[in-house]
Image (cartoon, rainbow, N blue to C red):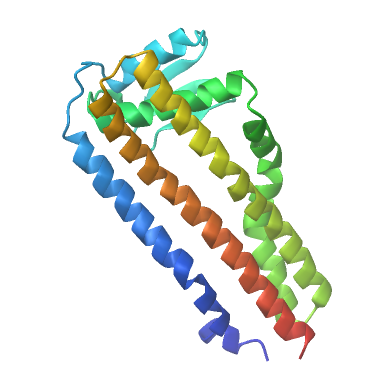
Amino acid sequence: MFFPFFFFDPTMLVLIPAIILAIWAQTKVSTTFNKYSRVRSSTNLTGAQLARMLLDANGLFDVKVERVPGKLTDHYDPKSKVIRLSDATYSSNSVASLGVVAHETGHAVQHAHHYAPLVLRDAIVPTANIGSGLSWVIFFIGLIFYNGFLLKVGIVLFSFFVLFTLVTLPVELDASHRALKMLKNVVVMNEGEVSMARKVLNAAALTYVASVAMAALQLLRMMLLSGYVNNR
């Protein structure tokens, strides 16, 4: 019977390293951002002003800057060509906020230059979205009815989500690299502040590493469960 898997599933143990990494990464992001949010930048620029300066410096005059509620809800919307900055960064002139804003501007620059990994990531987003949700539904149905075909379909669909997390990692790392370069060359931020911004962005990168680890180990877990059914 499959029902014991709902209550005790030994394969869940393979997720423990990724869970620990995810918790640590999230804690690292929060503590690092909070720490450098208390350090005011000598540039005296707010997040919104920095975004506009960097966009204009890269010739992206058509990209708008908007404010959105929340903390660290900052993102770049390529469809609308809008950088949306959270309440925590829009009006702030802290080193942490400017680092985050520069990172999102980096995504806008990637989009304008058709950065290959970003193009690939955007192309697989629809399939990845399906894979992240529908795959487990199909997979669990396969487990309940001991249907090897459905198990394989679930694994294949989830593989697209794993690919998405893998492609996302270099996209985020490159955006941070562009951000630090712009802070140094466009804003002429001093080296000490650039170093602080780098720590914030490095902490944020850990969350994407954790996402890759979690997705990969989830895929491994699916394979282990599939092997149990196929070898029953």
Q: Position of residue 154 (x, y in %)?
A: 73, 65
Residue at the image position 17 percent from the left and 26 percent from the top: 40
Residue 70 in view here: no
Q: The N terminus is located in which quarter? A: bottom right
The residue at the point 66 percent across, 50 percent down is 163
Pick the front one: 15 or 157: 15
Q: What is the quadrant of residue 153 in the picture?
A: bottom right
**For this view, does 115 lie left or right of residue 51?**
right
Residue 142 percent location from the top left of the image: 74, 75
Task: Identify which residue, 59 or 149, lies in the foreground.
Answer: 59
Rendered location of residue 92, percent (x, y): 23, 25
Number of marks present in the image shown: 0
**Residue at 25% over, 20% down:** 190
Residue 201 sits in quarter:
top left
Say which of 103 and 2 sits in front.
Answer: 103
* Rendered location of residue 105, percent (x, y): 45, 23
Q: Is residue 9 left or right of residue 203?
A: right
| Residue name at image x 40 percent, y 66 percent | 20
Tell me: residue 41, above or below residue 228: above
